Image (cartoon, coloured by chain):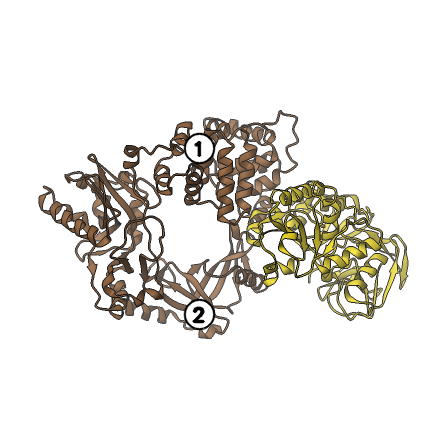
Chain colours: A brown, B yellow
Amino acid sequence: MSLKKFSELFGDLDSINSTNNKIEVLKNYFLSNDPIDNSWAIYLLTGKNNKRFISGRYLKNLFSQIYEYPQWLIDTCYLKVGDSAEVITLLLKNKTNSRKKKLSNISLNELLSKTIPELSKLNEEEKNLEIKNIWERLPEDYHLIFNKILTGTFRVGVSIGLITKSISKLINIDEEIISHRLMGNFKPSIDSYKFLINKNINLQELNSKPFPFLLANTIEDKIFKNSINDFQFEWKYDGIRMQLIKRSGNVSLWTRGQELVNESFPELLEKMSHIKDDFVLDGELLVWNFKEQIAFDFSLLQKRINRKSPTRSIQIKYPIIFIAYDLLEINGRDIREIKLENRRIELEKYFSKWQNKTENNITDIFKICDLIFPKDWPDALTYKEKSRENNTEGLIIKKKTSIYSSGRKKGIWWKYKVDPMQLDAVLIYAKGGSGRRAGLYTDYSFALWKDKELIKFASAYSGLTNIEIKELDKWIRKNTIEKFGPVRSLKPEMVFEISFEKIQISKRHKSGIAVRFPRITKWRKDKKINDADSLENAYELMKKIS
Amino acid sequence: MRTKQDYLIRYKDGNLYCELADIWIDPSKPVKKALITHAHFDHFTFGCEEYISTKETAILLKERVGDNIKIKTFEYGEEFKINGINISFHPSGHILGSSQIRFIFAEEKWLISGDFKLQKDQTCKQYEIVKTDYLISECTFGLPIFKWDESNKIANDISKWITNSPEKTSLLFCYSLGKAQRLLNEISQTNFKGNIYCHGSIHKMNNSYRELGIDIKDTIKIENKKKIDELKGSLILLPPSLSKGSYLKNFKNIQTAFASGWMSIRALRKRSGYDKGFAISDHADWDGILEVVKKSEAKNVFFHHGDSEALSKYLIGKESINVLFFGK
């Protein structure tokens, strides 16, 4: 099968908005291609190939060198396009009229298992020559895919859920099973594709993998009509949701992003391996302040996530805990179909057993989540408002009778997040966006008053509608004071309501404060810059919280 | 050394102006005398005492805004004199009637490119190479990422797009004057043989083109209460202004596309909100602009409309010509 089909698939997926149509297109693709190409397609579309063979910068330099193109001109084009692979693809158009034999029939498999991996074995000079050679031999329609794979930026609007659905439709097997099969390390091969579309469900194989996660929805007003006693209340922790699994003596830890992260948290695995029972636990991983029994900031957890085989001193510096919310499987028995309240009883029973019978103390790394018992809904609201005090984001509310299905199922689990903190700030800088927002000014910096001066306090790029972005972009171009490369300083005139989750002292910032997840929640056209908040207001807000 | 004030043509209040003849080119505010390069609304404003254009431009303009304007017309290549300056229109290949305007005074030649393209277009006269000393060129697509495909390739892509979804109504958005007629002409030469409907604004322009002797396939004016079934598998041409808002609710099971040069960029395609983008333009691409600069033999070039900075910088480094700036 030639790369042509995949190139068309990419074009289709890129232009179709309807989910059902995307599924249809994917199904047809899988039906009409080799298993090996299909497995590569899945590998690419699910974003499992994040490997970058060369950087975007390298690609641009190489093009500049080969075709004697000024670097600044390529950079100017990049500002408009927002993607190195695409810029080079556009510039390559009509450039490669070479008499060399075209690689019209190259397959996706050949490209990914041979052509590209072989590139990385070459030295720089050979590699450059070979890329030029491939550019000249590859039909133009394939350049984008080739460049994107090279730079590790292959992305198209397809989620793993969509792939799951289309395979599920293709072979008429439950999505949960497919989602199991796609979890973890999917390696492209004929066998992996055949396994994926195998109509016989292999229990043993499936058992080594986590269950699809059940997710909470944003709170809806209608919930308040129900009796408070129908629900279980938990704190909403700001860590990483995970499943901790022990089966046949082997412990594994999976993130919700279907990543196996055993290597990052060896101390947890070691401790849990001493438990006699097998289990699947749904919970949250956090860096934990054991003295005060609250979570540390998420930023400390970030220091652990990407670090494989952490040293002992890192483990002590950033002590982790796994807080179990739910028990999904115990000693080989899948209990997801029993009611939450009964699963909770099981969870508590086993936790107390493990606590007492395990030789080494597990509570320095593992616990089950505390429940909260509000008297009525106003009381629940009070708990929610207090959640900042214990470093949580609000409440999770679960129907006691809910079974553990998968996905963001409606009407059973809700998240009730604490209201964000807000300040009105003045727009002072704007920077060009990339990707989908290329060519527009979409990255903004905001300032607060300090006496008569505006001091930058946060940058944000989300929250405006596309129409507002365009409108603001026009305004920015007309009200620029100075340009510094891609950044423009602006006439202070526009006021925006900025919401954020956390505010703390920071020595790194001129303003002396740092905020977490700042985002634009309103364009305050009704406000003049003198109405914007001051740094003093920000400090007051900080005091009020702590 | 000449100052900006001495140029035969310069920028004044954001418009091109020839002081010696007291005449404006495509002014955006009412003036006494206005030369009009073509009949697009961003090159025309109401309220001028007198307009001067090609015959075709005058007919199209009157069709769009009514007979209530005073227009003097000239043929392509026909010279006329204002205050001792020789002025003439030359085909610019942008749309029917579109022109470049040449000024000759005291043996110095100036050429205003107007909006132009070099690509083949059977609905208007091919761009004419005109030699000049000074060139004022548009550069809407003045970056090397813009390279147009042949228009018949795009037309075939459009045809495939429609015929691949026979159960759908395909809405193609495009400018109602020029682009629409060019597309109609190209699409009639593809495998798509279904019905083509046009919005009233496009339909009107089709008729004017036909009256001016241009070959435009028969089209049906779209009525608001067309039965959904009748539209299945057919193509409907609409102006971009209707792409947002309630108009689309008149249709069921649609796919939408936009025909514009900007659609060659993926980010713009995605942001546009259309299902699909067809990169076809009535403006010159990068190579087209460079070719005109070269073949016009101009020693001095001004760019306006678009990414003039990059193009200027590139040319300054390459060719032995002066790239000048009006200053605004």
Question: In the image, is A291 to the left or to the right of A193?
Answer: left
Mark 1 or 2, closer to the camera = 1
- Give the numbered dot on residue A414: none
Nearest the viewer among B221 and A469 is B221
Vertical arrangement, residue A119 with respect to residue A330, above or below: above
Across and down, in percent, residue A134 comes to: 56, 29
Q: Badge 2, how many Cα within 10 Å: few under 14, some, many 20+?
A: few
Look at 31% across and 49% down and name the residue there.
A405
Question: In the image, is A12 to the left or to the right of A225?
Answer: right
Look at 66% across and 61% down and name the residue there.
B224
What whole-number distance in Å separates the C-alpha atoms at marks 1 and 2? 58 Å
**Which quadrant of the structure image shows residue A251?**
top left
Q: Amino acid at mark 2?
A: Glu
Q: Output the chain of dot 1.
A: A
Give the residue pinned by disc 1: A39
- The verdict on a common chain for dots 1 and 2 is yes
Classify mark 1: helix, strand or loop.
helix
Question: In the image, is B222 to the left or to the right of B270?
Answer: right
Nearest the viewer among A386 and B318 is A386
**Which quadrant of the structure image shows residue A219?**
bottom left
**Which quadrant of the structure image shows residue B154?**
top right
Across and down, in percent, residue B317 comes to: 67, 44
- Is residue A329 in view from this perspective? yes
Q: Badge 1, how many Cα within 10 Å: few under 14, some, many 20+?
A: many
Across and down, in percent, residue A353 comes to: 11, 46
Give the residue pinned by disc 2: A453
Vertical arrangement, residue A157 with respect to residue B23, above or below: above
Nearest the viewer among A43 and B157 is B157
Q: Quadrant of the C terminus of chain A?
A: bottom left
Q: Amino acid at mark 1?
A: Ser
- Is residue A117 in view from this perspective? no
